[in-house]
Amino acid sequence: MKRAFAAILALAVFLCAASFAEERVDSLTYAVFSYLPDPGYYQELIERRWAETEPDIRLIRAEWDCYTGEPPEGIDVIMYDAVMLDSLVAAGWIQPIALQEVHDSEGIFPFALSGLTVEGRLYGIPVFLCGNFLIYDQRCEAAAAAAHLTDLAGLPECLVINSENAMNKPQYLIEVIADTQGAANPSADGSLGDAMQLIDSLAIGAHKRDEDSQVAMAYDVGAGLGYIGFSESMRLLESRAEATRIKSVSFSDRPDIHRLYVDAVAVAKGVQGQRYEKCLQLINVMADAEVLTALSVHSGAPQYLLLARKSAYRSLSEAFPLYVQLEALAGAEDNHVILTP
C-alpha cells in the first residue's frame, strides 16, 4: 500500500513539474509586415509596451513574407495580408482566435473583422488598411469633382501613376474589373474594356516612376494634378502637402467598389498552452490603439497610415485634419476586404 501511494505521489510530482516546465515562456518570436513604411519603429513601440506588462518575456524579431516561402517555423506571431488568408488557413499556418480574446473588438471596423472570418472562425486581429486612392491637389476642380477615373479622360497625362510596375499593374487590373463588375472580389479574367488604356493615357511618365515613393515625390515637385497611391505615401509630401486631399475613386465609369487591403496579426501554427496565451497578449499589443496612434506620428510628422481601429483616429484627426478623410475612407459602410479572387 505504501509503495502504491509513493508511486502515485511521485507521478503527481512528475506531472506537476512537467506541466510547469511546459508552460514556462521566456521569449516569443514575432514578425511584422515588412512593407510598412518603418517596420523598425513599429517594433520599438511594440517592445516598449510589452515590457511594461511582461518584462520577463523577451521579444525576438523575425522576418517572414506572407506571400512566398515556407511556413513560419519558429515564429510565434506573424503579420499577414488578408489576400493570403484562404491560402494560410488551408495550409494550417495560422490559428483561429475567439472574438472575446480581442481587446476592445467594438473599436475595430466591423468589415475588417468579418473579412478575417472563415467558416465562423476569426483568424487574427486587423491592424492596418490600405488601398489605391486618388490623391490630388484640391485646387484642381476636375480632380476634386471626379468620382471616376473616366471623369478625367479629357485631361491626358494628368496623374502620376506607376501603371507599368509589376506589383501595381495587377492591382489596377483587379480594381478595374471590380468596379466594372460591381463585385468586391471578382474573377481576375473579367472584361477590362478600355479602362487600362485610360489609365495609361492619364499616366505621366509611368515608366520613369515605378516606385510608390517616386510617384509621390514626382507629384510633390509639381508633376500633374494628382496621383494614385496608398495613403501612407502622403508622408513624403512637402511643398504640395497643405493643398493635397485623398478620396476613393472608381477605376471604371461605374460606381466605386470600396475595397481595402487588410494587414492582420495572428498566432502561428503549433503554438499552444501558456505560449499561446502569451501570443494572444502580444497580438493585442500589436493592434493596440495607443501603439498605432504613436506609430502614426514619427518625429512630429504624420505618417498617414490607414488604421483598422477607430479610436486611433481621435487624437490624430485633431492634430492632423487630413486624418478626418482617412477615417472616412476606413469607416465607409460598404467597405470590403480584398481577398484572393
Image (cartoon, rainbow, N blue to C red):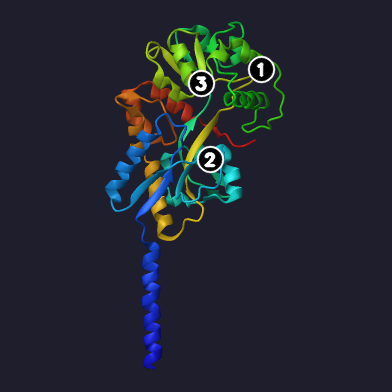
Q: Residue at x 34, y 55 (%)?
A: 26
**Rendered position, 333 above or below 283:** above
Q: CA distance from mark 3 to mark 1?
A: 22 Å
Q: Residues within 10 Å of mark 1 (few under 14, many from 20)?
A: many
Vertical placement of residue 215 versus 92, above or below: above
Dot 3: what SS? loop
Image location of residue 296, percent across then percent down: 36, 30
Give the x, y percent position of residue 231: 46, 24
> Callout 1, which amino acid?
Ala
Q: Does label 1 or label 2 sit earlier along the sequence?
A: 2
Compute the Cα span from label 1 to label 2: 30 Å
Which amino acid, mark 2? Cys
Tally of numbered tags: 3
Tell me what residue is drawn at x 66 percent, y 25 percent: 177
- Looking at the image, residue 193 sits to the left or right of residue 8; the answer is right
- Measuring from the top left, give residue 194's x and y in whole percent: 69, 16
Residue 268, percent from left and from top: 49, 50
Residue beneath disc 3: 211
- Residue that label 2 marks: 66
- Between disc 1 and disc 2, the foreground one is 2
Q: Are marks 3 and 1 in contact (CB under 8 Å)?
A: no
> Residue at the location (45% across, 26% down)?
328
Q: Amino acid under label 3?
A: Glu
The residues bearing labels 3 and 2 have C-alpha atoms spaced at a distance of 21 Å
Q: Is residue 300 rendered to the left or right of residue 90?
A: left
Q: Secondary structure at mark 2?
A: loop
Q: Nearer the viewer, residue 122 or 69?
A: 69
Q: Earlier in the sequence, mark 3 or mark 1?
A: 1
Q: Quadrant of the C terminus?
A: top right
Name the N-terminal-most of marks 3 and 2: 2
Residue at the disc numbered 1: 195
